[in-house]
Amino acid sequence: MSAEAKKQTWFSGLGTALRDAVLITAACSVMGLLVNLFHPEKIPYIAEEEYETLVPCPEPGGEVTPLEATDPSIHAEDTFIVDARRKPEHQVWKLRDAMSIPYDYLEPIPDQTLKELIRRTQKTGARRVLVYGDGKDPDSGEQAGREISGKGIKNVFFVKGGAPALKGPEPGGGP
Amino acid sequence: MNWRGHSWLALAARLYLGWVFVYACLHKIAYPGMFALDIATYDILPLWVINLAAVTLPWVELFAGAMLIVGFRVRGASLAVAGMMVMFMVAIVIALDKGLGMACGCFASQTTEEDPISFLTVLRDSGWLFLAVYVAIFDRNAIGIDRLQKKRRNPHG
Amino acid sequence: MGKLPALAILVLFPAVAYAQTPTCDKLEGEQKQLARELLSTQHPYDCCDGTIIECLQEKPVCALAYRLAENICLRVADKQDRDKITRGLSRRARSMMAGKKSKIDLEGLSSVGKGGAPVTLVEYACARCPFCAKITPKLHEAVIEGVLKGKVKMYFKVFPIRGHSHSKETGLGFMAAVEMGRFWEFLMHSYENFDRFCIKRQFNWAEAAGMDKETFKQLVADPGVRDRVVASKKEGIVNKVEATPTFFINGRKFFGDMNFEEMIDILEEEYDRVKGIEYRK
C-alpha cells in the first residue's frame, strides 16, 4: 500500500470528483438540448403555455377495519381502546380504561397525543387499537381510526355503531 | 477506507444504481413532453425551466447511470447521481407537504394509483442516495474502466 | 376488376367514419389504428346500441357517440395508451350513469351562473388545495361567460383537508364570506393570490373582497360558523369525498379524469341529457 493511499481521507479527491460531476451534467445537458432538435416528440425549450396539472389532494388516512359491537376481541386484554367522542361524553361513560382522543373534523390529532397513544400501547403490550366514536354518520370513531392508522399505527379497528352500540339498551329502557 | 472489499461492495451498488437510473430515464427520453408534465405537476419550478429540465435531466440520468455500470469516472458520476437524488427528494417532500396525491413520475409516466408519492418514496430515494454517497466516498479504485486506466498509467502500482 | 371497388370500400369505410370528428380525422399511423380499434369496440352508454363507429354511421348521429369519439381521439392524440383510455371511459360512464344521487345541502350558499341553468355543479374543495385554486376560477369563468353560460350553475362546499396547513382557518374564512354574502369574490381573490398566502393576509383579502375586516374576523371566530364548516365537511365524508377537488354533477359524483376540457365536455353532455338533446343537428 503506498504512502499516498494511506493518507486518503473521506474528502480527498473530492474536487476532481465534483469537477467530473459538473462536467457530466453540463455535457449531458448540452446533448439533451441538441437531441431535442431532432427528436420525433420534441418540445419547445421554453414552455409557451401553462401545463394543466390537476391532481386532487387526498384526505390523509389509513386502513381501518370495522368490528361489530358484539365482537369478543373488543374485550380481549391485548386490545387498547380509544374513545373518539368529546370529553364530556367520555366523562359520563367509557369502555374499560379507554384513552380519550376527541376527534375534531377540522383539526388533526396533536402529535403529542399520538406519541402518548404509542407509549401506552407499547407499555400495555396491546396488539390492536380499537376506536369507538359517536356512532353517527359519519362516525367519529371510524374517522379517528383512519387518522391514527394513517400515522403508521398498525391493526386499527373501529366499532360499528360506536358508543351507542357498545352500551346497548340502557336499563329501564332509557336513552 | 482502503479496504479492498469496498470495491466489490461498491460494484454491486453501482450496478444496481446504474440500472435504476438507466431504466428510469428511457421513458423520459422517449417522451419529453410527458416528463415535462410530470415536472410541472410538482408545481415547484417556474414555467420557463420546466421544458429545459425535461429535455436535459434524463440524459444526465442516462450517462451517469451508464458510467456507474462501466466504471468510468465513477466518483463524479456517483456525485451527479447523489445530487439528482437530493433534488428529487426535496421535490417529493415539498409535494407531500402541499398534500398532493400525485404520481411520482420517477419511472415511466405512471398514474397516481400505480405510483403515488408517499414518505416511502422518500425512504426509497434516501436508500439510493446512501448508495451513491457510499460509492463516492469508498470506491477509490473502481472496478471497470477507471481501474484499467490506472493500471495502464501505472503498470506496477 | 370487380374486387377493386369492394376493396376500396373496405379500406375507405373507416375513413368515412373518421371524417365525422375533427380530431379523429387528424390522426395518423399507429394512433389512427388505435383510435379505430377503440371506436369499433367501445359502446356509448346511452342513445345508441352499437359500437361508437357504428353509431357514427347512423343518421341522425347520436350526440353522445360523437362526443365520445372526439374524446377517444383527443386521448389518443395525447399519447394515452389503450388501458388508460378505456379506464377513463369507464370512469366517465360511471359518473354519468350512476343511479344514486347524493344529498347535498345548498341552503344559504350562493351560486354562480344563471339560476335557471339545468345542470348543477357542486365542488367540494379546500381553500388551501393548489389544484382547486387552478380549476375553480376556470370553471367560474366558463359558467359566467364561457361555454357553460346558461347551462350550468355552480356551488362551492367547504371541505378543509387535514393535511393542508391552515385549512381550518381558511375554511372558516370561506364560510365567514358566505355569511357576509361575498363568497365568490373572496374565493377568487384567495385563489388568485394562492402562492402569496399567509394566515394574517386573509383578513386583508376579506377587505379586498369588499367585506368589513372586523366583522369578518368576528365571524371566523364564531362557533356557529365553525359548526357550518364541520357540517359541510361531515356531509362531504358521507358523500364519499376523499380528496379535493371533488365534483358532483346534478348530484352524481364525478369520477372522470380531472382536467378542464374533460369537465367542460361532461357538463355539456349532462346539459344535452337534461334537455333531451339526443342527436346532433
Image: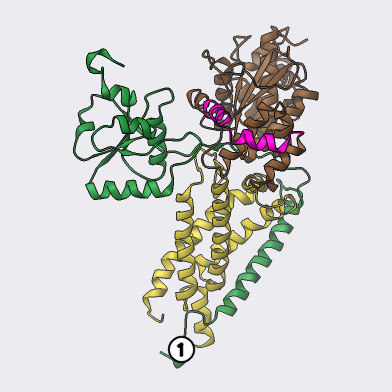
Chain seen in brown? C
Q: How many marks?
A: 1
Dominant secondary-structure state across the stretch colored magenta: helix
Horizontal and vertical percent for residue C259?
66, 32
Horizontal and vertical percent for residue A167?
26, 23
The answer to whether A114 appears left or right of C185 in the picture is left
Q: Callout 1 environment at 10 Å: few (<14), some (14 to 19), or many (20+)?
A: few
Quarter of the figure with the C terminus of chain A: top left
Chain seen in yellow? B
On whether residue C230 falls in the magenta region, the answer is yes
Horizontal and vertical percent for residue B39?
64, 49
The answer to whether B64 appears left or right of A163 in the picture is right
The answer to whether A39 appears left or right of B63 in the picture is right
Task: Quickly name the residue at label 1.
Answer: A7
| Magenta range | C210-232
Give the camera-side residue of C143 and B85.
C143
Quarter of the figure with the N terminus of chain A: bottom left
